[in-house]
Amino acid sequence: MSPELISILALVAIFVITGVFSVNMGALAFAAAFLVGTLAGGMSSDDILAGFPGEIFMVLVGVTYLFAIARANGTIDWLVYRSVQLVRGRLALVPWVMLAVSALLTAIGAVPPAAVAIIAPVAMGLAAKHGISPLLMSVMVVHGTMVGGFSPISVFGVIVNGVVDDSGLQGSPLFLFFASFALNLVFAAVAFVLLGGRKTAEVPVTADAPGAARDETLLARVEMSWDKALTLLGIVTMVVLTLFLELDIGLVAITVAVVLGVISPQAHRDAVKNVTWPTVLLICGVLTYVSVLQELGTVDYVSHAVSGIGVPLLSAFLLCLIGAVVSAFASSTGLLGALIPLAVPLMAAGEVGIAGMVAGLAIASTVVDISPFSTSGAIMLANSREPERDSVFKGLALYGVAMVVIAPIVVWLTMIAPGIN
């Protein structure tokens, strides 16, 4: 049996064992990475551990550590309260505000996971305080990053357009941007309706309404203080350094958190306990195993088999499906650069339209980032409340599966089959 087939069967076994025995999937994935990589792939321990997602680890730990401090000293409560005031208490608008801010951040150059990391704590804080579905909020934030995610100056836009140009093809950056903008907006609107967005707080919430901060304890937490001011300054610093100086958000976040911890050690001494370690284990384990799959050539093996089918439109659809499946468990950034070249022969021969094929692959490979195994979905999950985390995980996983199935069909019907050039 080939290493590629063994690795696929092991992945299936991970899901089965997790479902039957409730073992942390990340722990299973680490074990599978070791066994499959060593026994089937002949990889050394260094080769296996080279696939450990250190950057994602730092994002998850650094951001959740910083915002654990922000929760502890009331900064999140203050932001939540002021955000509700900004929309004049009309809570049905809050998910759309979060989507708009996420879209703006990615459109001007923020990496989507970085934008999610900035927005998630405030968005999930609003959801928790005012009874908005955390699953709905997660979906709106992540779709928001994709609404602006393929602007010509965005990270994803630069990657895709660069790969197309390097392949000697004439792409359409504006079509890519507007196609992703429109389709993610439609997906978000449908999700808003299906996940109960229309039922969210039909009666405006004000400072004097039920649920608002009225007692002395809550009022104290929404009043500005020295600790809150420093924490807000730290968060703004993180945003500026991440967006404009392109520093790693995980490293910046943990540095800011440490500084705040030193300034107020008594107030923040338990913050590190609130880092979502089970989620960190889950995500890092799965991504390490995906790295083993890539090292063994499993992804390329499947992709090349699909592209050699001989029916151009069917090959195009299957490439979109592969992009959606793999991206639900891996980095969309890396996948975009690897998957689009596989479609170059189809586009160069004129068998499919260039603009439609590029946009279809790009959207199918990124709209599934809501999956809890993808970075953006993982960050939203990490910022949900502990009692809701299991249900949010299941909801994100189910929504991710739905996107894996639906997105390739939609982009094929609307962009690839019509032969848009």
Image: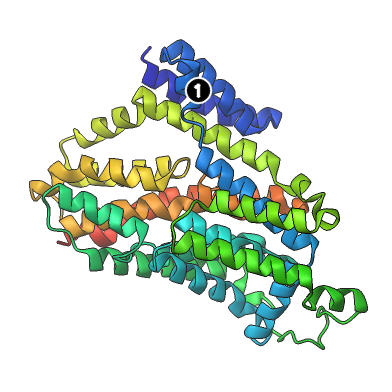
- Quadrant showing the C terminus: bottom left
Which residue sits at x=60%, y=55%? 380
Residue 411: image location, x then y, percent: 31, 57
In this view, the residue in front, 95 or 21, is 95
Callout 1: helix, strand or loop? helix
Task: Tell me where residue 279 sits by quadrant.
Answer: top right
Residue 413: percent from the left, percent from the top?
Answer: 28, 58
Q: Is residue 410 above or below residue 7?
A: below
Q: Is residue 414 left or right of residue 378?
A: left
The residue lying at 31 percent from left, 65 percent from top is 153
365 relative position to 73: left or right: left
Dot 1 amino acid type: Ala
Q: Residue at x 53, y 44 (%)?
A: 56
Expressed as whole percent of the image width and height from the top left, the position of residue 213 reads: 83, 79
| In the image, residue 398 above or below residue 19 | below
Residue 384 visible in image: no
Residue under label 1 = 10
> Can you say which quadrant of the picture contains the N terminus?
top left
Q: Position of residue 105 (x, y in %)?
A: 46, 68
Query: Which one is nearer the viewer's eye here, 260 or 376?
Result: 260
Picture quarter containing residue 173? bottom left
Q: Residues within 10 Å of mark 1 (few under 14, many from 20)?
A: some
Q: Is any atom of residue 242 visible in this view?
A: yes
